Image (cartoon, coloured by chain):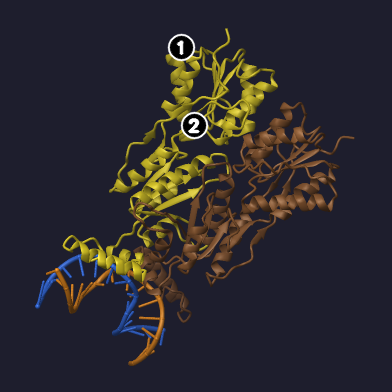
Chain colours: A brown, B yellow, C orange, D blue
Amino acid sequence: VLNGYAGVSKDMHEKVMAIANQMGYVPNAAAISLVKKKSAILGVIYEVSSGFSNLYFSAILEAFRLEAEANGYMLMLLSQSTEHQIEYWKHCLSHKITSVFIISTRDQSVVENELRNHGISVLTLDPIHQSANLIATDNAQAMNLSLSYLYHLGHRKIAFLQGSLTTYVGKARLDAYREFVKQHNLTPMVLLERDNPSYSLQEGYDTTMGLLKQFDAIDAMACCSDVLALGAIYALQDSGYVLPRDVSVMGFDDLRLCEIVRPKLSTVRQNSRLIGKTACETLLKMDDPTSVLKPIQVEASLVLRDSTAPKKP
Amino acid sequence: VLNGYAGVSKDMHEKVMAIANQMGYVPNAAAISLVKKKSAILGVIYEVSSGFSNLYFSAILEAFRLEAEANGYMLMLLSQSTEHQIEYWKHCLSHKITSVFIISTRDQSVVENELRNHGISVLTLDPIHQSANLIATDNAQAMNLSLSYLYHLGHRKIAFLQGSLTTYVGKARLDAYREFVKQHNLTPMVLLERDNPSYSLQEGYDTTMGLLKQFDAIDAMACCSDVLALGAIYALQDSGYVLPRDVSVMGFDDLRLCEIVRPKLSTVRQNSRLIGKTACETLLKMDDPTSVLKPIQVEASLVLRDSTAPKKP
DNA sequence: TTGAAAGCGCTAACAG
DNA sequence: CTGTTAGCGCTTTCAA
């Protein structure tokens, strides 16, 4: 009667609903799950070391949650209790969770395989290493956006401030730079012997100092994160450059920090709203957990502020 | 047999466990919940507008999760589907959730009462308005820490850069300043006609400019957030002051931003780890949902960096 | 110490 | 259109 069965008269329906409401009736999720052998719960592994990217990750989680909600699903934050020896997959099986979204700053490929081997669909955001089913910003497109903009401003000596050289994301961005440089016949200005695995301010500062020593007359810098970009800005300022007059700097991420820094940072915005939504949609229609989707790439966009300017004549 | 019943021989126990593991046995949470009429799930309302404090909130969520995990509880992110007309409390009743932790940048007092009226225990983090059961940083102690430190550096003309004047937290901090000023016989330096409800950079900037116009010779500023403090720093720098030589500035929150700003920001750190843990403990032992606990105040600590210095002679 | 049975709240299938 | 029934996987109680 309550399940929206078609063959019920309208007033009867209303009557029943009214009484149900009045009695405070709420269906018991456990009983439903028990008989249906499934539950309307999506699993989330959210293990984010408290860095800056938190902002980005929590925006994605929120978007994911909203989409889940719109589809009648609840989110469960999965715990991996090492003490009680209960693993993620057990929690999932126990709660009849068949899809898991991984948002993590650590490498979760082991967990991922474990889950998949137990018949659970998995989608990983920005995986450290290439992963079976991943969703991420289209790094090639995003980096291109950044570089093209600098190019159109008239800059030709465009240096690249890389992030991690070993992660999936880091490599993709570097590749995009190489490709761009080749296509436009520019001199590559990048210090490949340096790795900036933590995308930190200090790494950005140091690597920029290195770039400044190695190459003279840098017009512009394309950075792999906003924090790296800020490090670059400090290094440039400490070296006597005035920004953006002398050098243009582009960040990556569009963290809130961009707006409170001087000069305000031009950057590439990752579309967290769309990523979270798409992630949820993808998981919900992924019927075979072992299937390998092609990486889901979400387009990024440019946010222009005060750290970029046309090349001075 | 599997439930840890005492009267079973050890080797029998091991034997059973081995076979159970081999068979991939995982207990069905729904069935357990159905028969026990309860579930090992804590509810979380996590609705955080994407501001800076995200960092703080997600650290607390993480700490809360870890403590929940240690106690064998899972976390469920509650959704309020307005479209399907399902409210938080229905979700809770449906899933036999009896405790909810609210982390929200919005006022949730309506939700709070609704939940409580349905027999669900609620604890709210940093509520906008005074709330029945709340957990928060001990704002009086925290503000005192900040002010005392500035005082001990030799500063006597200590201005106060308030945040919101209408929220529970904002008022508590202002009260602490007033109290301190009275006790130490200082001149109050605060612009009460200005409200800085969004704790934003611009508000910090503008209000500081106002303070500078109103009072001459400010020694130090105690701010209600790190972002406000940064606004103050910009205002001071734009007015020709060199920091921290001329003016000392203290923030509040200890966001990551403190470390990447110049000068690095001295601030008051809210103990997110302890707050999250305590919140979970409190909820788990709160047997009567209607009981009104006294506010749980968690001590803050000082983090000293480069934005504070002794008063120049 | 072991076995059997009832029942938690619901859905689905089938008979009226 | 309505009513009845079996059974989802587990715990608990009672009987052997």
Choose the circle earlier in sequence order: 2 or 1. 2
Residue at the farthest top position:
B313
Of residues A90 and B88, the one nearer the viewer is: A90
Q: Return the mark for residue B150.
A: none
Looking at the image, residue A12 lies above or below residue A164: below
Does B309 sit left or right of A253 as displayed?
left
The image position of residue A30, as x and y in percent, is 36, 66
The extreme right residue here reads A313
Residue at 76% x, 26% y: name it: A240
Residue B234, located in which quarter of the rendered image?
A: top right
Q: Position of residue A209 (x, y in %)?
A: 71, 32
Left-right relation of A311 to A41:
right
Residue indicated by mark 1: B185
Secondary structure, mark 2, is helix
Q: Position of residue A276 (x, y in %)?
A: 59, 57
At horizontal 53% and vertical 41% (from top left) the residue drawn is B55
Judging by the rendered image, the residue that carries numbered circle 2 is B170
Q: Amino acid at mark 2?
A: Gly
Chain to which the residue tagged by mark 1 belongs: B
Amino acid carrying label 1: it is Asn
Between residue B195 and residue A191, name the one nearer to us.
A191
